[in-house]
Image (cartoon, rainbow, N blue to C red):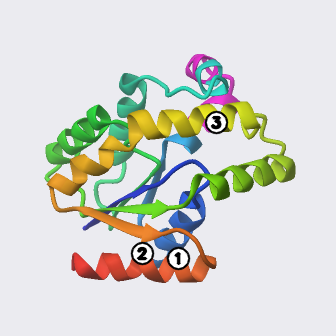
Amino acid sequence: MLNIVLFGPPGSGKGTQSEKLIAAHKLVHLSTGDLLRSEIAQKSELGIKAKIIMDRGELVSDDIVIGMIRNKINANLDSNGFIFDGFPRTVAQAGALDKVLAETGKAISLMVTLEVPDEEVIQRLLKRGEQTGRADDNMATIENRLNVYLCQTSPVKDFYEKQGKYHPVQGLGTIEEIYERIESEIKKVG
C-alpha cells in the first residue's frame, strides 16, 4: 500500500500533482481543502464555521479535520493507498494521522514536499484568484497563509524527516518534469 503526504506551500501545485499520482497509482485522494470546500458549498454547520476560519487564512481545528480524515480512511480500507494533499498541516495532525493509520495497520510511505519560492507561490495564487474568482486568493490572505505555513506547517517536515520519510522535490518546471521528480522519490521507497 502506498500512502503519500504531498506537502508544500499554498499554490505549490499539490492539487495538480495529486491528480497525476491518483491516476497512476489508483490512490484515494484526501484533500482537507476539498472536503472543507464541499462542506462550505453545502452550507452545513461545519462549512459555515470553516468558511469564517478559512477566510481569515487560519487553520480549521484538528478535531474536525482528523474526524473527516478518519471517516474517509475507514470508508476506503481496501484501496491501493491514499494521497494526503495539504494534510497534515501541523505536527499534532501528523501524529494523529499516524495513529489513525495505525488503527488499520497502515502507515505513511513517504512525504513529498514541493519546494517553490514564495515569490512564485504569490504569483500563482494571484493568477488562480483572477482565473477562478476564489476570494481567498488575494494578497492579504496569501501573505497570512504563507506565514501560517512557515510557522505552523513547516515543522511537519522535521516530523517526517525523523522517520526517514521526508523527500523534497523541486516544484518549478513543467507539470511533467515535477511529476517525474515525484515518481523518482516514490521508487526510492519501493
The residue sitting at 15% across, 46% down in the picture is 102
Q: CA distance from mark 3 to mark 2?
A: 27 Å
Percent from the top left, x then y, of residue 135?
A: 78, 34
Q: For residue 47: magenta?
A: yes
Q: Secondary structure at mark 1?
A: helix
Percent from the top left, x then y, of residue 1?
A: 25, 68
**104 is higher (above) or lower (below) than 108:** above
**15 is higher (above) or lower (below) than 188:** above
The reply to whether discs 1 and 2 touch (Cβ–Cβ < 8 Å) is yes
The span picked out in magenta is 35-50
The answer to whether residue 11 shows anywhere in this view is yes
Q: CA distance from mark 3 to mark 1?
A: 25 Å
The amino acid beneath tag 3 is Glu
Q: Which mark is residue 143?
A: 3
According to the picture, the residue beneath numbered tag 2 turns out to be 182
**64 is higher (above) or lower (below) than 103:** above
Q: Secondary structure at mark 3?
A: helix
The residue lying toward the viewer, choosing from 140 and 3, is 140
Q: For residue 43: magenta?
A: yes
According to the picture, the residue beneath numbered tag 1 turns out to be 178
The reply to whether discs 3 and 1 touch (Cβ–Cβ < 8 Å) is no
Q: Which mark is residue 9?
A: none
The residue lying toward the viewer, choosing from 27 and 175, is 175
The amino acid beneath tag 2 is Ile
